[in-house]
Amino acid sequence: MTPERIALISDVHGNLTALEAVLADIEARGITRIFNLGDYVGKGPRGREVAEICRERCEVNILGNWEDFLLAPEPDFGRESVGLMWWRLQAWEQAEWLRTLPFSYDFTMSGRRIRLFHASEETVHRRVRFDHDEQEFLGLFRNTEATGLDVPEPDMVGYADTHDPYYETDRDRRTVFNTGSVGNCMSDPTPVYVILEGVMDSDQEAPFGIQWVRVPYDAEAELAYAASVGMPELDEYTYELRTGFYRGNLRNDEQPTYHRKG
């Protein structure tokens, strides 16, 4: 049985420069299979271009929360409509494809039943932080209407959404990992993605590996492009790409600490 490598990317958020750097690294490693865990659009200036490339290059593409609400047929943006409408119009050519992507994807590798989704087992709009409690941890492995009820439950779950890469396992060998973010990673703002290595489509236990890869890129070039096209919320975007802290810190005039408040 020959092991195979799969690259998992997520949360590109319209950051084409970061995506191109990550895809170049994946190609340089000889990896040809790429799975995408969602959030192609919003926050950055080139959601349409990101979606077009991911549609062509990624074998698996999964729905993210930004696709679900930003490209809804009748969105309710409220007071934040200026920036959201700009991102919606920018990505609209890919709207039909993006908003109809599957919620989750199940496969086996080296005897592990792996499930991928964007944020949680129930919805793309409920995130599970790295410092979750036991109930949230166990809940990630449940079958729901969103994941499908008549399928085997996974023993390994990979997800995204929080922009925080991490790994956790319990005494029953249930394992959770977060891919982090390609285009808007928090804490360390360097784009990050995951490589899984093992024997695909095999129920037999075999060597298995998981690796996180950081890929430097030209963030200033991405910001210059965003400025040239008049993207809304440029100051907030600049803050996140340069510091790795959420824009909420900027609005509240706080000094950056850790991006999640206690």
Image (cartoon, grey):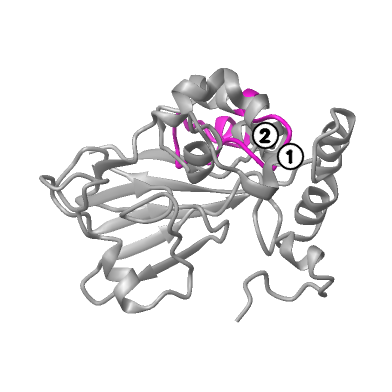
Report how far apart the C-alphas of labels 2 and 1 lie in the structure. Answer: 5 Å
Disc 2 residue crowd, few under 14, some 14–19, many 20+, Cα 10 Å: some
Would you place residue 156 above or below residue 115 in this image?
Answer: below
Q: Which residue is mark 1?
A: 82
Question: Does any portion of residue 191 appear in the rendered image?
Answer: no
Q: Position of residue 136 (x, y in %)?
A: 34, 70
Question: Mark 2–mark 1 contact, CB under 8 Å?
Answer: yes
Verify whether residue 251 appears in magenta.
Answer: no
Residues 115 and 29: in front is 115
Verify whether residue 46 appears in magenta.
Answer: yes
Q: Which residue is mark 2?
A: 85
Q: Give SS at disc 2.
A: helix
Q: From the viewer's perspective, tell me whether residue 182 is left or right of residue 54.
A: right
Q: Residue at x 55, y 42 (%)?
A: 76
- Residue bounds of the magenta highlight: 25-50
Q: Quadrant of the N terminus?
A: top left
